Image (cartoon, rainbow, N blue to C red):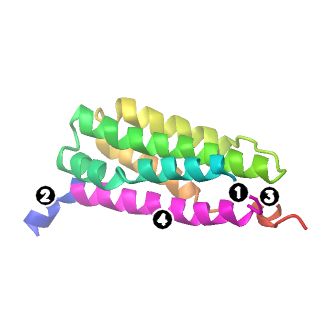
Amino acid sequence: MKDFLKETPVFAAYAISYLFIAIYWVNHHLIFHVAEKVNLKILWTNIVWLFVMSFIPFTTAWAGKFPASRTPMAVYFAVMTLASIVFHILFYFILKENGQEFKFTPRSVISLITYAGAAFFGNKHPVATYIVVTLVSIWWIFPAKNAGKRWNRKK
């Protein structure tokens, strides 16, 4: 049991990363559900987003191994920030191509600020940072109240 407890930071980074990927998986499916038209800009933005997401396993292992070190924590949360930014760009392109309007929501802004803040200050209070980032990420499990209208395709 003692050996397992020593691995708590690694497990915490893994659990947060898994949650992060799961939430993105669902939201990725939902945003492509509204896409009746897809262009090269959307496809290449999606490729860039997948590239950013491919760094999650590496940064998870690194941050889990060195949870109080500045560089691994900064890179771990910088990848989360970049994934969020590129995902918003992808969503913008999909909505624009399909004749819908993109608006930043308070949840989007708070998430971006939280992830970026974690990248800069995460090593100061790693446990608190993981908790705050987890809570903000969990917020994305629940769709926005008006999301039902957006997910219905135009006829």
Sequence-earlier tag: 4 or 3: 4
Instruction: Give, as a single range, the part of the protein colored magenta.
Output: 10-37
State yes or no: discs 1 and 2 in contact (Cβ < 8 Å). Answer: no
Q: CA distance from mark 3 to mark 2?
A: 44 Å
Sequence-earlier tag: 3 or 2: 2
Of the residues tagged 4 and 3, which is closer to the observer? Answer: 4
Count all numbered tags in the image, as a single digit.
4
What residue is pinned by disc 3? 146
Q: Secondary structure at mark 1?
A: loop
Q: Residue at position x 81%, y 67% from top?
A: 152
Residue count near mark 4 (Cα–Cα under 10 Å), binned few <14, some 14–19, many ≥20: few
Q: Of the residues shown, which amino acid type is indicated by label 3?
A: Asn
Q: Of the residues shown, which amino acid type is indicated by label 4?
A: Ala
Q: CA distance from mark 4 to mark 3?
A: 22 Å
Of the residues tagged 1 and 2, which is closer to the observer? Answer: 1
State yes or no: discs 3 and 1 in contact (Cβ < 8 Å). Answer: no
Q: CA distance from mark 3 to mark 1?
A: 23 Å
Q: Of the residues shown, which amino acid type is indicated by label 2?
A: Lys
Of the residues tagged 3 and 1, which is closer to the observer? Answer: 1
The image position of residue 113, as x and y in percent, is: 53, 35
What residue is pinned by disc 4? 22
Q: Secondary structure at mark 3?
A: loop
Sequence-earlier tag: 2 or 4: 2
What residue is pinned by disc 1? 38
Residue count near mark 1 (Cα–Cα under 10 Å), binned few <14, some 14–19, many ≥20: some
Residue count near mark 2 (Cα–Cα under 10 Å), binned few <14, some 14–19, many ≥20: few
State yes or no: discs 4 and 3 in contact (Cβ < 8 Å). Answer: no
